[in-house]
Image (cartoon, coloured by chain):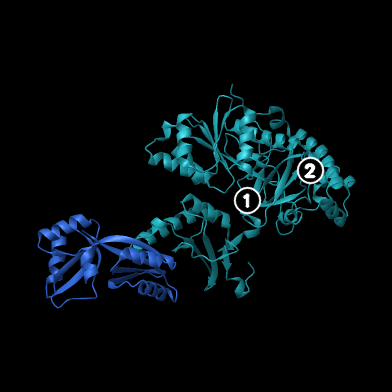
Chain colours: A cyan, B blue
């Protein structure tokens, strides 16, 4: 039978109850962390805050922040709050922006995480009649494990496909009548294209919904995916540090993601001053876990820039909603007065079938910002005439304009020609700094 | 019948042409014809060589980005009006020439020209029917 919520008592509770639960849980979680995590205890002592100073969420702002660097510094056991023997799982971040971060889970932590994912699956219309094809990567990455667990909890027939091998994905999808697809949005777009190439029409598959996350994507991309697969596409958000996907999820309104507030407190802060901003302001998202046993995090700065909304949602859920992250606070650029994030550029490239091998060059000429993006071309971008290349450049440029709101100049360059340091490309060269311009 | 042209992507940076010409020279390959198409950011260096496959391999191993395209090669008498003649034939059949260039080596009697068109087979058929002599891979190697 179609359920509207996985855990209605939590998902639809009155806002006052959310507040009450958060107050009670926060007091306990802070004391638990203070007693068990030396690293955070030192931070609190340094700031002169004691657990007894925290009587509820109104005192949250007194607590010190945790940053990604703290997690790296404390690697691997420094933030572990319980004995290893109580832990049943490790997951890890991809390490694309530096040293890896590992997160530990007790059985209760895994259950909480999977329940969050189950809420997302039900919100996307999942029931025990569904066949849920999970093509997020399995392994250390939380995508596969999280949605797999959520799908199980709901009682869907779960296809643990992991990522890649698109021909096999399509064969299983068609032969076993998959109804829900879970993967990254760029992979969903790719599956859509592959289906079309194989001569399938959108109505030939049995898919009804997709749960997509783990990378930035746009509304435009959502419409394309929905059209090519004949589905409704739902966004999901999460961080390995906090559990994984399912920290927040979209409902049928497709208008922001509901944060699982019985397990996490969300704050928005000014990324420069750390000051807490009122709901509705744009700023950096900060999370505090409320129930975690192995790897609890207090005021963890996600670096994701977004906006929260407490506006009533017609789906009946009372949990606060967050917009899709607009970018990362630590690599935001202001070009011609517009906020630009490398993650947006990456999303466009993935969307257009390019590997994220690019370099952004910003400069100022005649008092105007110049904005150039070098992109490594694909094998088939190059033939014997410049026209083919300049046309592709134009296409990418138009897609960038649609995403960013300003027009960069896109240059396709030879494969492997963008300088890499320690295996990772230098993404941004801002020559305005040379001119003494504060950027 | 069409002949193979190699196209090399050349970024507008100093030393790029040195790398390209050096690696072809070291592989013992002769250049028979060449042309350059350029834009503000990059150029495309097109070559007809004695051994296109070997040239591609040599260029790629020195880090160049290369593609092979089939083009039409014709051999025409080296006298006034020869080029006009082929151009007129192609125009009459609505075959558009994207670009063309001449061979470096010319005999006393004949000049050779590379033609880039959308449909090689159609162009070759028409040229042959009009008595124009086409070039083959083996002609290039033997030049």
Q: Quadrant of residue B111?
A: bottom left
Question: Which chain letter goes with mark 1?
Answer: A
Nearer the N terminus, badge 2 or badge 1?
A: 2
Please tell me which residue is depicted at 10% across the width and 58% down the height of the picture: B129
Q: Which residue corresponds to the image point at 17% horizontal and 76% vertical from the top-left?
A: B107
The CA distance from mark 2 to mark 1 is 23 Å
A366 displayed left or right of A436: left
User: Residue B67 location, x and y as percent?
Assistant: 35, 61
Evaluate if marks 2 and 1 touch, with contact meaning CB atoms under 8 Å apart.
no
The residue labelled by disc 2 is A84
Count of numbered labels shown in the rendering: 2
Give me the residue at 67% from left, 53% from top.
Answer: A100
> Is A6 positioned to the left or the right of A197 in the image?
right
Question: Is residue A159 placed above or below A183 in the rendered structure?
Answer: above
Give how far across and how far down residue A230 sits, in percent: 46, 35
Q: Which residue is mark 1?
A: A94
């Amino acid at each position: 039978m179609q359920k509207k919520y996985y855990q209605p008592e939590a998902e639809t509770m009155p806002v006052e109850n959310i507040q009450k639960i958060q107050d009670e849980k926060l007091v306990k979680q802070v004391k638990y962390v203070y007693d068990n995590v030396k690293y955070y205890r030192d931070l609190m002592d340094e700031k002169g805050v004691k657990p007894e100073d925290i009587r509820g969420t109104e005192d949250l702002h007194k607590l010190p922040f945790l940053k990604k660097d703290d997690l790296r510094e404390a690697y691997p056991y420094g933030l572990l709050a319980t004995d290893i023997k109580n832990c049943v799982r490790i997951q890890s971040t991809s390490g694309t922006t530096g040293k890896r971060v590992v997160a530990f889970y007790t059985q209760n932590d895994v259950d909480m995480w999977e329940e969050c994912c189950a809420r997302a699956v039900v919100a996307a219309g999942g029931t025990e009649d569904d066949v849920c094809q999970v093509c997020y990567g399995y392994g250390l990455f939380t995508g596969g494990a999280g949605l797999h667990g959520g799908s199980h909890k709901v009682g869907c027939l779960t296809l643990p496909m992991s990522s890649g091998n698109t021909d096999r994905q399509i064969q299983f999808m068609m032969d076993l009548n998959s109804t829900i697809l879970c993967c990254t949005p760029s992979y969903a777009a790719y599956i859509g294209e592959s289906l079309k190439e194989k001569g399938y029409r959108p109505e030939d598959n049995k898919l009804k919904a997709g749960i997509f996350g783990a990378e930035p994507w746009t509304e435009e991309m959502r419409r394309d995916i929905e059209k090519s697969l004949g589905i409704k596409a739902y966004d999901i958000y999460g961080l390995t540090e906090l559990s994984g996907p399912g920290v927040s999820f979209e409902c049928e309104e497709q208008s922001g993601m509901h944060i699982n507030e019985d397990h996490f407190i969300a704050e928005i802060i000014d990324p420069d001053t750390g000051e807490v901003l009122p709901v509705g302001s744009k700023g950096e998202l900060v999370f505090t876990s409320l129930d975690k046993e192995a790897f609890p995090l207090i005021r963890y700065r996600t670096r994701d820039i977004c906006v929260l909304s407490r506006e009533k949602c017609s789906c009946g859920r009372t949990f606060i909603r967050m917009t899709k992250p607009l970018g990362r606070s630590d690599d935001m650029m202001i070009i011609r007065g517009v906020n630009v994030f490398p993650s947006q550029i990456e999303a466009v490239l993935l969307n257009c079938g390019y590997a994220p091998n690019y370099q952004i060059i910003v400069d100022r000429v005649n008092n105007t910002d110049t904005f150039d993006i070098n992109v490594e071309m694909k094998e088939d971008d190059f033939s014997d005439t410049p026209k083919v290349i300049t046309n592709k450049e134009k296409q990418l440029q138009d897609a960038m304009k649609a995403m960013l709101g300003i027009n960069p100049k896109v240059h396709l360059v030879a494969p492997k020609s963008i300088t890499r340091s320690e295996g990772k490309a230098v993404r941004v060269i801002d020559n305005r700094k040379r001119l003494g311009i504060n950027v | 019948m069409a002949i193979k042209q190699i196209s090399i992507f050349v970024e507008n940076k100093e030393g790029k042409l040195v790398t390209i010409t050096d690696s072809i020279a070291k592989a013992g390959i002769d250049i028979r014809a060449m042309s350059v198409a350029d834009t503000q950011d990059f150029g495309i260096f097109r070559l007809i060589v004695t051994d296109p496959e070997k040239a591609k391999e040599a260029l790629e191993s020195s880090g160049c980005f290369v593609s092979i395209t089939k083009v039409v090669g014709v051999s025409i008498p080296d006298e006034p009006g020869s080029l006009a003649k082929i151009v007129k034939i192609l125009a009459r059949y609505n075959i558009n020439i994207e670009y063309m260039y001449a061979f470096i080596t010319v005999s006393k009697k004949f000049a050779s020209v590379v033609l880039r068109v959308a449909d090689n087979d159609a162009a070759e058929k028409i040229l042959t029917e009009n008595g124009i002599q086409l070039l083959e891979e083996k002609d290039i190697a033997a030049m």
